[in-house]
Image (spheres, rainbow, N blue to C red):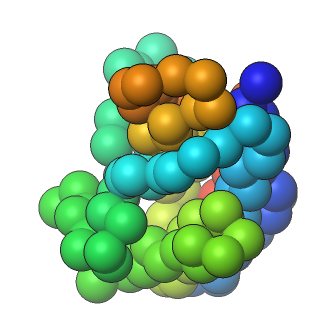
Amino acid sequence: QVQLVESGGGLVQAGGSLRLSCAASGSIVDINAMGWYREAPGKQRELVADISSGGSTNYAVSVKGRFTISRDNAKNTVYLQMRSLKPEDTAVYYCNADVRPFHFSGYVVFWGQGTQVTVSS
């Protein structure tokens, strides 16, 4: 069993900062890519940023220069530092990870439960 647990969401004023964390635990042999997605009311879930096991990163155009994704492979944890937040960043943020579980030959994508980020104007 693999679990991803997010933390760090909350309410912040426009221009403020938040740092999200997501820790993967359980029967894990290896983790490939990890990422953050968000889903705003009435909109589809979209990629915010992802990071490979080697540290290569990819960002949505809307967050480039404001958000930074990083990971600690020893802790199986991925972070999202969010700065200069805007009201349009308001959404539920989900992390995911491409995990190779024990007793399984391939990789499976697991998702966290989501954490609410609300940016007030």
Q: Residue at x 65, y 62 (%)?
A: 76
Residue at the outermost top position: 42
Q: Position of residue 87 (x, y in %)?
A: 53, 56
Q: Residue at x 24, y 74 (%)?
A: 56
Q: Position of residue 62 (x, y in %)?
A: 25, 60
Any part of residue 116 in sight? no
Please give left or right for residue 52 compared with residue 38 in the image.
left
Is any atom of residue 29 visible in this view? yes
Instruction: Please state the horizontal and vertical placement of residue 120, each as a whole percent of the image.
Output: 68, 59
Percent coordinates x, y for residue 33 in the rendering: 37, 52
Decide which of 121, 51 is in the foreground and name it.
51
Q: Residue at x 31, y 75 (%)?
A: 54
Q: Nearer the viewer, residue 3 or 86?
A: 3
Q: Quick check: 100 above or below 90?
A: above
Relative to 117, 50 lies left or right: left
Q: Depth check: give the residue in front, 56 or 11.
A: 56
Indicate the quadrant containing the C terminus: top left, top right, bottom left or bottom right.
bottom right
Residue 25 higher or lower than 113, as above or below: below
Q: From the viewer's side, name the closer residue of 46 and 22.
A: 22
